Image (tube, rainbow, N blue to C red):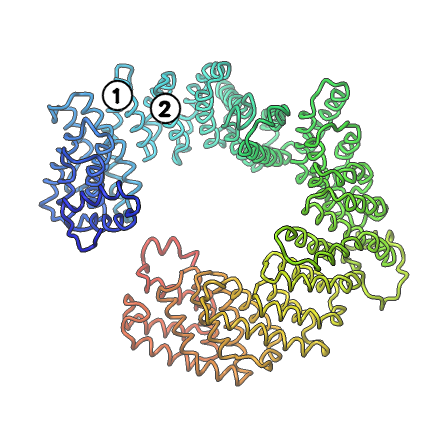
């Protein structure tokens, strides 16, 4: 489609047909048609395109054009054209009264837009006028039903158009007042139409219209009669879905809470659906029982406070409220399994959360009578959710799709979240009930009268509430773990849930270490079982991390089990990593001699395997193995700490349990010994897999964790690592290498023996990073962000050292300015952080000072372009902080640079006048030492430059700028 074609009716029609018939041209044609739609010619050709001989596609485009012109280009027509336009539009609606429906609807939307443009002056009482026109046979050629359908269609889309049209606050207020006046005529009309005498098609459209006017703001006290009609419509299968949607709108409307008496009166209508609900469950009519659930949930969810208050009201109101609660409880416990047999019980969870939240805001004294009513309900809910969380029979579950299994997993997590909140209400009463239930179920399970799913479900419930159980609870949780030993586990899912539960109580066990003897046997059995290995290794990692002061008596038992699991080689890679992390935690509470003895047995096979992998050429077949093996050592280094810093109580306990140290304090730490052994292989792998981001990240993670634990002890090994990071970064720059370099410099950068290496790192990182700015820098934004963070930290911590390096500071300064123009917020933030440090260093350093004086105008240009609109608004605070640093350290130079801006017309934005720019510069000078004020000045100027100053939009987003 050539853009030189004029926007004639024939050309537009041809373009529309091409759009639908030639997919390869759709993008270009769409662009041209958009231009046609906004052209003044559209006021003319839109009518021609709706001619009776045109295709539906062409007619629809014509009707859409008309709507767009009315909404967005109303200013293009003069007032004397308004009445002819209205008449012509009504004629078109009559023309399409028999279809196609899509065109008729579009024209009704156009008429709604016209009403919003003409109200109140040019079409006063438009709604009343429309209703009168259609009722008084203003369109004699149309049947009564057709006239009624068109009128209702217009009344349905009118509120929708009101909400979808972009209006000023004042205009929206005026139109809301006018449409609210129209309700006086809409409500009686709907009352006349929502009767059994109305044809089905009229009833359907009337229900939709009612729902839209409820969304608009029809007060439900005025609509009570209509609402009762809608409840009756639920008994008609052809009206059911529309009626459900309407009732959901009624109860969910934000203003509905202002009419509590009306809501209470409507409870009886909702309760009247109980028989219908029960019958649908018997007949397995999913559409009906899920629809009723939606109505009940909408009522309860949006009127929780009223429900809480009503349970202590008059007897009839109390009984109705309790019956409603029983209905939503039934909705929570729909028969069958989610999501296969039903798919709406999860909609009730938000109500139960809101209910407990509402109760939690009541004072303890006032809560007692409420809890007498609600506590039995909550225990019933716990039983329902426990049942709903059960896995289906094995054969049924095997037939589920992966998507259904994932939905069920998420559903169980939602149940867990709901249960967690209810512990806050039920407290130890819930624990007591659950422990008794578990004891009973375990006995039944032993006798073969109970399936594993029921046991698994209650263990899942315990896991869900574990976070809420206080550390000092010692009456019921010990019974839980004692009872756990009595369960004859028969299914991997059952075991996994038990292990998850054990891990979830790891922090509680820190204060109750006797429990460890009950749970460790099951956990240690699990780490050698591939089916439950994930749950077992997670549990063991949690237990060892949270119980460092208690784990020493079990250390040998744990380490032997871990070694057996490593030798069996049955676990998944991630499970192996967690297992090695647990080994590190356990070794941390042992003497150095014992640590080395265990490590020699457990780590030697991994070292040999690492060396074997290092000798192989890179290939996809070994990549995963290489990544896992490197990470095994990284995770060990991350958890093995022979100088633990614990709380006073834990430190005392740990010192009592840890055997006395029998080695020379000058002896190297275990991590240092291991690192010395594996470094040659690790470096070979790093060189061989230089371009594999994941493996390089794993290598860097290993060295970072070693550095953090060894601190200055690492200096003797630092030479090889320095050469490694320099060589790897030269070949393939990455954020992982930069972060490692940063840690090395900050850890021992000032050590006398390391100073030459520090300089080498800084010089090589800077020179290689600067090369990226000669290429397409947007391909390296993550590395540039890391580089800028590196520079900011080095400037902050090693300022004098950095300046003395042989680095091209001018290029670095210019690179930071270029980085400010990148679209990623994090990169801009990092660049600004470095520039602020750089500018603040200028007073003490002549080299930096001269660089800024010579090249600072480039920085100011970049800042002004960002403020003027070239950059996103979200980075303006970072830019403002750079402005303040300039203003603080280069006040005279900044004033001169801003003077150039003032004299440059149309810069940095044509919206900013010379006076605006002068005010901006003066305000910056006035508040040069006030960070908050400087930010406000810059924000105000950027809004002015973008044409947003003083708009409602600017006010709404100001808090986020």
Examine the rendered structure and indicate whether residue 393 appears above or below residue 865: above
Given residues 128 and 855, the one toward you in this image is: 855
Q: Position of residue 821 (x, y in %)?
A: 42, 66
Q: Is 881 left, or right, of 791 in this rendering?
A: left
Q: Residue at x 53, y 64 (%)?
A: 783
Q: How much space separates mark 2 and mark 1, taking CA atoms?
A: 14 Å
265 horizontally vs 469: left or right: left
Sequence-earlier tag: 2 or 1? 1
Residue lying farthest to the front in this orientation: 617
Kindly tell me whether residue 376 is visible in this rendering: no
The quadrant where residue 935 appears? bottom left
Q: For residue 734, what is the image quadrant?
A: bottom right
Residue 575, percent from left and from top:
70, 45
Q: Is residue 558 left or right of residue 64?
A: right
Q: Which residue is mark 1?
A: 193
* Residue on which the image places disc 2: 243
Name the residue nearer the viewer: 233 or 396. Answer: 396
Compare residues 739 and 890 and report the one nearer the observer: 739
């Amino acid at each position: 489609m050539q853009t030189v074609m004029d926007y004639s009716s024939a050309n537009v029609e041809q373009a529309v047909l091409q759009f639908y018939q030639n997919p390869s041209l759709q993008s270009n044609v769409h662009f041209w048609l958009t231009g046609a739609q906004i052209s003044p010619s559209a006021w003319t050709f839109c009518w021609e395109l709706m001619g009776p001989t045109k295709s539906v596609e062409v007619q629809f485009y014509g009707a859409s054009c008309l709507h767009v012109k009315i909404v967005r280009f109303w200013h293009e027509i003069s007032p004397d054209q308004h009445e002819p336009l209205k008449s012509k539009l009504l004629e078109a609606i009559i023309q399409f009264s028999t279809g196609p429906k899509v065109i008729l609807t579009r024209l009704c939307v156009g008429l709604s837009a016209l009403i919003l443009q003409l109200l109140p002056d040019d079409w006063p009482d438009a709604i009343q006028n429309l209703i009168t026109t259609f009722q008084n046979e203003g369109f004699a050629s149309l049947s009564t039903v057709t006239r009624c359908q068109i009128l209702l269609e217009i009344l349905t889309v009118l509120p929708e158009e009101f909400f979808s049209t972009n209006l000023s606050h004042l205009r929206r207020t005026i139109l809301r007042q006018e449409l609210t006046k129209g309700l006086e005529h809409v409500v009686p009309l709907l009352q006349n139409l929502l009767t059994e005498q109305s044809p089905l098609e009229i009833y359907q459209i009337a229900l939709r219209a009612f729902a839209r006017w409820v969304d608009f703001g029809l007060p439900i006290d005025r609509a009570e009669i209509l609402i009762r009609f809608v409840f009756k419509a639920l008994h008609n299968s052809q009206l059911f879905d529309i009626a459900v949607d309407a009732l959901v709108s009624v109860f969910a409307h934000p203003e509905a809470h202002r009419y509590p008496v009306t809501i209470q009166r409507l409870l009886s209508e909702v309760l009247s659906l109980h028989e219908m609900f029960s019958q649908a469950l018997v007949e397995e009519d999913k559409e009906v029982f899920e629809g009723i659930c939606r109505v009940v949930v909408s009522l309860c969810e949006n009127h929780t406070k009223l429900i809480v208050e009503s349970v202590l009201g008059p007897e009839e109101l109390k009984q109705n409220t309790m019956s409603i609660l029983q209905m939503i409880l039934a909705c929570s416990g729909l028969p069958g399994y989610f999501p296969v047999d039903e798919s709406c019980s999860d909609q009730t969870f938000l109500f139960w959360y809101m209910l407990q939240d509402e109760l939690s805001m009541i004072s303890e004294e006032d809560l007692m009578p409420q809890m007498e009513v609600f506590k039995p309900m909550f225990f019933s809910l716990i039983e329902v959710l426990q049942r709903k969380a059960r896995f289906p029979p094995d054969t049924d579950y095997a037939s589920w799709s992966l998507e259904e299994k994932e939905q069920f997993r998420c559903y169980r997590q939602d149940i867990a979240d709901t249960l967690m909140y209810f512990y806050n209400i039920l407290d130890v009463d819930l624990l007591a009930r659950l422990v008794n239930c578990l004891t009973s179920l375990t006995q039944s399970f032993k006798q073969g009268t109970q399936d594993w799913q029921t046991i698994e479900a209650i263990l899942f419930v315990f896991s869900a509430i574990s976070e809420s159980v206080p550390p000092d609870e010692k009456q019921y949780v010990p019974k839980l773990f004692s009872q756990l030993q009595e369960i004859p586990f028969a299914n991997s899912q059952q075991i996994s849930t038990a292990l998850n539960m054990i891990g979830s109580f790891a922090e509680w066990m820190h204060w109750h270490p006797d429990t460890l003897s009950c749970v460790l046997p099951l956990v240690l059995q699990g780490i050698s079982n591939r089916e439950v290995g994930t749950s077992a290794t997670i549990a063991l990692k949690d237990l060892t991390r949270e119980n460092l002061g208690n784990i020493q008596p079990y250390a040998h038992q744990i380490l032997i089990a871990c070694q057996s699991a490593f030798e069996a080689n049955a676990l998944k890679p991630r499970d192996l990593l967690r297992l090695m992390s647990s080994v590190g935690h356990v070794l941390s509470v042992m003497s150095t001699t014992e640590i080395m003895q265990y490590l020699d047995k457990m780590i030697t096979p991994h070292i040999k395997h690492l060396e074997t992998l290092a000798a192989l050429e890179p290939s996809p077949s070994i990549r995963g193995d290489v990544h896992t093996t490197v990470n095994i050592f990284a995770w060990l280094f991350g958890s093995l700490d022979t100088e633990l810093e614990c709380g006073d109580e834990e430190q005392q306990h740990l010192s009592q349990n840890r055997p006395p140290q029998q080695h020379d304090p000058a002896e190297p730490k275990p991590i240092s010994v291991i690192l010395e052994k594996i470094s040659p292989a690790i470096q070979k792998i790093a060189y061989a897999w230089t371009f594999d981001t994941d493996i390089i990240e794993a290598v860097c993670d290993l060295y970072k964790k070693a550095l953090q634990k060894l601190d200055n002890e690492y200096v003797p090994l630092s030479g090889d690592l320095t050469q490694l990071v320099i060589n790897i970064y030269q070949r393939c720059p990455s954020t992982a290498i930069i972060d490692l370099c940063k840690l090395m410099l900050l850890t021992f950068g000032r050590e006398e023996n390391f100073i030459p290496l520090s300089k080498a790192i800084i010089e090589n990182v800077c020179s290689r990073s600067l090369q990226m700015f000669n290429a397409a820098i947007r391909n390296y934004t993550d590395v540039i962000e890391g580089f800028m963070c590196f520079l900011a930290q080095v400037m902050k911590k090693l300022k004098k050292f950095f300046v003395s390096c042989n680095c091209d500071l001018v290029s670095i300064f210019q690179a930071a300015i270029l980085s400010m123009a990148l679209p990623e917020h994090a990169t801009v933030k990092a660049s600004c952080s470095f520039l602020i440090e750089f500018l603040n260093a200028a007073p003490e350093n002549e080299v930096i000072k001269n660089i800024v004086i010579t090249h600072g105008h480039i920085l100011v240009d970049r800042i002004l372009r960002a403020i003027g609109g070239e950059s996103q608004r979200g980075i303006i605070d970072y830019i403002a902080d750079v402005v303040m640093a300039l203003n603080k350290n280069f006040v005279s130079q900044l004033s001169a640079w801003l003077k150039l801006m003032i004299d440059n017309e149309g810069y940095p934005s044509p919206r900013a006048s010379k006076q605006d720019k002068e005010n901006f510069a003066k305000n910056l000078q006035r508040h040069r030492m006030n960070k908050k004020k400087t930010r406000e000045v810059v924000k105000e100027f950027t809004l002015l430059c973008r044409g947003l100053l003083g708009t409602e939009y600017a006010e709404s987003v100001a808090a986020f700028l």
